[in-house]
Image: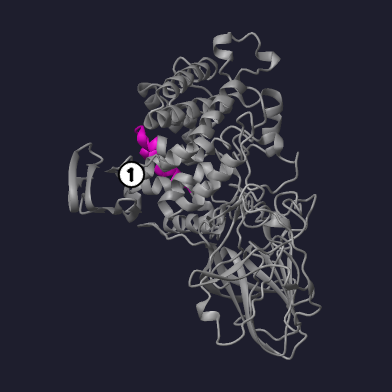
């Protein structure tokens, strides 16, 4: 039906299957009416994941529907229906190819097979995936004489065709995110070299006359589309359409540096491209709901768009899929066969989405509704983490048992993924040699701390005490192994970030740690050195502990690795790797991963200073003269919060607006604090 794409949605199908309700009144005519339903492979049996596996949920496709008029049942799908395998829709696979022959009619109707699958797994739908922004193309002729459509924006979506033809002409559309270093078409950057079949291709055969069509079974990640056809085209015949879950944008930001504004917009576009029914990692080679990506970006996601329904539905999949021992899966819904990634279920920092994201939602909405529903599962997960810590590697058997029992040196973990200067193979080597104990122990401490707070809010007093004590033990274990005389040692920036963000240091030590981190960054040429799991907190901890200038140095850095290097090299979304395009201009990896876009959370919560936590509004902006000004808003659960500041005539002028029926605490850079009610406020301070 128009306006609802890819129904019934991508869920853990064996546990719950979504149903949709459509109002078809305007589709009906007086007299006889015919219902025709086109079924495709979709996420049910199409290719998904790094392994491009098919038939992960099932091999047969089926339809269950009923029609009601004024509340009365008129018809249902039963043995009287007819089906056909011969129609305009051909092979369709959401990562590979969709074929459509507009000349064909539906023929060779045959009886259907009726099966009773039961209705116990059927649930209501989450947000629909719908069509949104549209983009016209600029035609490029490459050095290889390829005809390329450049839509100017990397999106998740499809291309709509609108042209006239004689019939029989074939149009082939091959989608990609970026051209190669010579300006030619390439799709190797997002391929699994072992199964390089993520073609992202459309093959459309024209009918005679007007051809107005778009794919209905597939969406792809792309900015560029190579067109192969005998038709004489100008580019006007094609329109790119962005598709994503029907979420409203809830934030806006602008400052005096265009590249920073572009960075913020790029983050929003990566979110749109990866919130397609589930929070995915990328819209190209995997389309997978990786827990780690969602975990690190969730705070930013709640600023940028009304994403709660997507996050909550995905978390419920995590709960439904939880193992008996309490471990949770690191990728949902299932996109890989058994054994492919199973060893990474429970991965530290990644699967911690299961307590971190509900905690953040509780904090942002000031509501325990979700946490209350998930709490039995979250508690079970927390106890699993504590029990897992008791397993240890032989090389650590001489560690005092008091510390060893909360020292996480077992299991498989993805680690600080995409950390500059560290190859993925080094992560695996670190895992094999030591089990990532720093990362694992830090996230055990954080998990116990957050679960304790959630238990306290739910009135689960015994659990609150139990997990609080577990946090203290994990914290002590971490400090025993990794903190020397109250300080972090080493040049890896993630170590400093975690020590502060996970509350593994006392307050005085945090200020020292932030200063040491700033020195490490300075020695690194004022460049960041963090990967997936700590970039989201990097600038936050610097700003919060008297190193805001360093945070802004990182934000404004233009040399690789940095956020603005991507912008200056044509990025319109966030790259998976800081080195997605190197100095040789050769593209590597995905160009639409939102993880490193978590810096936009820093922009909202520190640069603008807007926080909405446990029902309290706080505005504490951090300013930097290099930006000139900053302004923006957040449509919070309490209403729109506006914040701006500007350097002008030797002063910093602050303007704030507080929504109706609210109170807010304003904290200026000088430390001056004032509590205000609904309304508009202006303050001035010396530079």
Q: Secondary structure at mark 1?
A: strand
Q: Is residue 466 above or below residue 417?
A: above
Could you tell me how many numbered marks the image carries? 1
Query: Which residue appears at 37% of the width and 37% of the height?
Result: 543
Query: Which residue appears at 72% of the width and 52% of the height?
Result: 57
Q: Is residue 19 above or below residue 476?
A: below
Residue 560 on image: x %, y %: 55, 47
Q: Quadrant of the C terminus?
A: top left
What secondary structure predominates along the stretch shown in magenta? helix
Query: Which residue appears at 33% of the width and 49% of the height?
Result: 608
- Residue tagged by mark 1? 611
Query: Which residue appears at 74% of the width and 59% of the height?
Result: 115
> Can you tell which quarter of the image residue 449 is in?
top left
Give the color scheme: rainbow, by chain, secondary structure or one colour. Answer: one colour
The stretch in magenta equals: 542-557
Residue 669 on image: x %, y %: 26, 40
Magenta region includes residue 549: yes
Q: Nearer the viewer, residue 421 or 36?
A: 36
* Image side of residue 9 versus residue 497, left or right: right
């Amino acid at each position: 039906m128009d306006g609802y794409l890819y129904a019934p949605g991508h869920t853990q199908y064996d546990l719950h299957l979504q149903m949709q309700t459509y109002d078809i009144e305007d589709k009906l005519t007086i007299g006889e009416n015919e219902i025709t339903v086109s079924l495709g492979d979709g996420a049910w049996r199409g290719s998904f994941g790094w392994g491009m596996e098919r038939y992960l949920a099932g091999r047969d496709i089926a339809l269950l529907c009923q029609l009601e008029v004024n509340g009365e049942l008129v018809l249902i799908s039963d043995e009287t229906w007819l089906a056909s395998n011969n129609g305009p829709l051909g092979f369709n696979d959401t990562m590979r190819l969709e074929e459509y022959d507009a000349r064909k009619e539906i023929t060779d109707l045959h009886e259907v097979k009726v099966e009773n699958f039961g209705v116990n797994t059927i649930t209501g739908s989450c947000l629909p995936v719908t069509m949104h922004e549209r983009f016209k193309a600029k035609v490029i002729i490459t050095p290889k004489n390829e005809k390329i459509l450049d839509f100017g924006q990397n999106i998740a979506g499809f291309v709509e065709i609108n042209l006239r033809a004689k019939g029989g002409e074939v149009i082939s559309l091959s989608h990609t995110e970026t051209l190669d270093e010579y300006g030619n078409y390439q799709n190797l950057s997002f391929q699994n070299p072992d199964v390089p079949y993520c073609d992202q291709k459309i093959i459309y055969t024209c009918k005679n006359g007007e051809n107005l069509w778009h794919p209905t079974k597939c969406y792809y990640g792309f900015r560029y589309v190579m067109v192969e056809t005998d038709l004489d085209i100008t580019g006007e015949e094609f329109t790119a359409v962005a598709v994503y879950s029907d979420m409203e944008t809830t934030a806006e930001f602008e400052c005096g540096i265009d590249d920073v504004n572009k960075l913020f917009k790029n983050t929003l576009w990566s979110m749109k491209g990866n919130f397609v029914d589930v929070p995915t990692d990328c819209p190209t080679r995997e389309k997978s709901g990786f827990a780690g990506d969602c975990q690190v970006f969730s705070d930013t996601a709640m600023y940028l768009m009304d994403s709660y329904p997507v996050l909550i539905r995905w978390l419920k999949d995590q709960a439904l899929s939880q193992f008996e021992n309490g471990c949770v899966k690191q990728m949902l819904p299932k996109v890989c066969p058994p054994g492919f990634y199973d060893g990474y279920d429970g991965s530290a920092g990644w699967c911690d989405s299961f307590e971190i994201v509900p905690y953040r939602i509780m904090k942002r909405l000031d509501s325990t509704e979700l946490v209350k529903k998930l709490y039995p599962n979250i508690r079970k997960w927390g106890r699993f983490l504590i029990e897992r810590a008791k397993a240890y590697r032989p090389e650590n058997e001489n560690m005092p048992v008091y510390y060893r029992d909360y020292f996480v040196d077992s299991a498989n973990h993805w680690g600080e993924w995409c950390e500059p200067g560290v190859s993925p193979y080094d992560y695996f080597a670190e895992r094999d040699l030591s089990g990532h104990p720093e990362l694992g122990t830090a996230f055990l401490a954080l998990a116990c701390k957050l679960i304790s707070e959630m238990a306290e809010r739910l009135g689960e007093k015994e659990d609150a005490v139990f997990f609080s004590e577990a946090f203290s033990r994990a914290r002590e274990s971490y400090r025993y192994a990794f903190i020397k005389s109250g300080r972090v040692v080493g040049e890896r920036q993630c170590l400093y970030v975690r020590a502060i963000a996970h509350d593994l240091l006392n307050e005085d030590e945090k200020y020292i740690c932030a200063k040491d981190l700033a020195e490490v960054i300075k020695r690194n040429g004022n460049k960041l050195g963090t990967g997936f799991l700590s970039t989201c907190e990097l600038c936050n901890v610097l700003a919060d502990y008297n190193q805001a200038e360093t945070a802004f140095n990182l934000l404004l850095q233009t040399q690789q690795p940095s956020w603005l290097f991507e912008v200056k090299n044509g990025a319109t979304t966030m790259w998976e790797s800081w080195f997605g395009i190197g100095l040789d201009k050769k593209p590597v990896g995905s160009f639409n991963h939102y993880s490193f876009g978590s810096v936009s959370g820093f922009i909202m919560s520190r640069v603008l200073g807007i926080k909405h936590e446990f029902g309290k509004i706080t505005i504490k902006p951090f300013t930097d003269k290099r930006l000139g000004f900053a302004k923006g808003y957040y449509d919070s659960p309490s209403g729109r919060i506006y914040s701006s500041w500007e350097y002008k005539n030797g002063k910093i002028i602050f303007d704030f607006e507080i929504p109706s029926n609210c109170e807010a605490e304003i904290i200026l850079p000088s430390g001056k604090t004032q509590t205000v009610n609904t309304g508009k406020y202006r303050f001035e301070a010396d530079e």
